[in-house]
Amino acid sequence: MSELNQKICEEFAGLVVRKDLVKTVKGNAIVPSYVLEYLLGQYCATSDEASIESGIQTVKEILAKHYVHRNEAGLIRSTIREKGRHKVIDKVSVALNDKKDVYETEFSNLGIKKVLIDSGTVKQHPKLLVGGVWVIADIEYDHTEDKDASPWILSTIKPIQMSHFDYEGYISARKQFSLDEWIDVLVQSIGFNPEFFGRRSKLMQLMRLIPFCERNFNLIELGPKGTGKSHIYSEFSPHGILISGGEVTVPKLFVNNSSGKLGLVGYWDTVAFDEFAGKQKRVDKALVDIMKNYMANKSFSRGVETLGADASMAFIGNTEHSLPYMLKHCDLFDALPEKFYDSAFLDRLHFYIPGWEVDIIRGEMFSEGYGFVVDYLAEVLRHLRNQDYSDRYQDYFQLSPQISTRDRDAIHKTFSGLMKILFPQGGATEAEIEEILKFAMEGRKRVKDQLFRIDNTYAEVNFAYKDKAGKDVPVNTLEELQYPNYFNQTVGEVTDIGLPEPSPLSVAPEHKKSEPAPSREPELKEQHLTFAENQRGISYDNLFGPYLDGAKQVTITDPYIRLFYQAKNLMELLETIIKQKAEEDEVIVSLVTVEDENRSEQQREFLEKIQSSMFAVGIKFEYSFENSTSQHARHIVTDTGWKISLDRGLDIYQQYDVNDALSLATRLQKQRTLKAFEVTFIKIEN
């Protein structure tokens, strides 16, 4: 096991499970992950391989024997009749039969209804009345001649969720992890391998947890298909419910005025609306009005009576256009149904997760390491709903006075939620608090930027904060930095992240020297550029190409050209050099790197293959190894007098599936998401 996995197992003994076991035991059982992990937590919450294997078999036997498949419901009913009693795992819901004044249970997969349940159990587990709950239940069969009586008898019923947990123990164990370690623990706990995500992408994943730990938090995530938007809300917690956006009605969501029955917001911590987007969807205007009031005031009316609730709301849907298209031609809420495309409704959203930044989920991105049994983490998050961390930044930073009360509340809620998730024990440093505050402000600014487009009555807001020195620090969204000309408030301004205008990097040098040159040559100048994580649109061609133009000798110094993907990066840089030279010219390219102690033979094989393939196109490639393993310099030097200093070397892209020949990220560098990095162009004497 990795050091982190060992640490997780030691500090949270009995509360973690190996995440790949869920797939192992699931088979064809259509149950949420938290149900399976509840069982795995009973039998496999250990790092001992023998115990895990034994536990897997036990869980498989339990599922095989007690989980009710709909197509086998008749067989299970027969088993109960023949044996007189049988334990089942099923989703059940309860309704009040007011004519008989009794509560009746319906088993979803088993297909039996009107099973009596005592009122004490219903009071203890009120969610049985709304949406249904997964349970382990003992059912008996006793035939009777009474036609109105059900032969099915509910003996015992136990909802599949933890009954208690040690919060102080959780806080104590959290203190043993650094922030980076803790973020990775949480990413593994929701089922992903943190190695495939950058820091910003990890925070995007954790943002989906805030509705579970923050009361009345309104979140929206719109993006491409296949990014796992609904996974958290359907699989993660017994305290959240995922419903289709088209199935929402006022009685179901809030209250039925005729019966007085409370809706979903009264029983669930999080109500998520799946497939929320779709311009043609029909939406009840009354529902939108009640939702607007609830999202703003945490209350809704039932006739003359006003009721309150603390359920958070998450709206998730697919976008219909690419990001630059939306920024240029419409706005980031363009995909919403017409009735929800309402500035008053949108203004009540606290955070907009930019779904276009979230990678489409691939098989290798799922975790095989250890993480919390999700039911345990769900209980922790639920406990944190009672706490408020919204003022934890005020010792260091102060929000701009221009920020309105509604914007401030949104920022506070997001900041509080992230602080609860990352620093439940407190003790965050000034830099860590600043990172979380900026992230919270960016998500609200994304909402406000689009409101400016939709409704010009909204006043422009300076999203900024002051540090202790009194310096104003502006906050920008990533898409604003990447496409500044599409934002009215930034046209003509120069940003410190992205490609400033005018810039030689904005010209892709696709021409050869032997071809007619464009009318406008890019101006080369000394400059320092900073790029944000998850930014796109950068290739070696437009980043390095103009500075390599005309060079006859290029020296690349990078100690980390060892693994396959690093050799591939080198190959792509050489392709850029090929594009910059005339076909009849030759260029000498020298690589200075460090020999890999463990994979020296493979490393040499990569470099020699590159050397062989380059010769035919006029690139004389040579390489040498430096003895010093402490070498960290990474730069490119040309005989035309330019030095390009790179803090990450050529490793500027996040992981992608290099074996997927049909993926644009494989074929076009501009379609890959970036790691955060900096590059400096320095003019030197020849």
Image (cartoon, rainbow, N blue to C red):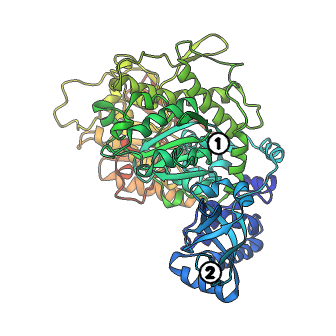
Residue 130 lies left or right of residue 652; in this view the side is: right
Q: Residues within 10 Å of mark 2 (few under 14, many from 20)?
A: few
Task: Check the picture and name the quadrant holding the C terminus.
Answer: top left
SS at circle 2: loop
User: Can see residue 625?
Assistant: no
Q: Which amino acid does the dot numbered 2 rest on?
A: Asp
Residue 128 quadrant: bottom right
Which badge, 2 or 1, comes first in the chain's sequence?
2
Place of residue 548 in the rendered image (x, y in percent of width and height, measured from the top left): 36, 33
* Mark toward the viewer: 2 or 1: 2
Place of residue 673 in the rendered image (x, y in percent of width and height, measured from the top left): 44, 42
Q: Which amino acid does the dot numbered 1 rest on?
A: Ser
Above or below — where is 390 with respect to 268? above
Determine which residue is flagged by label 2: 146
Q: Residue at x 39, y 49 (%)?
A: 665
Determine which residue is flagged by label 1: 628
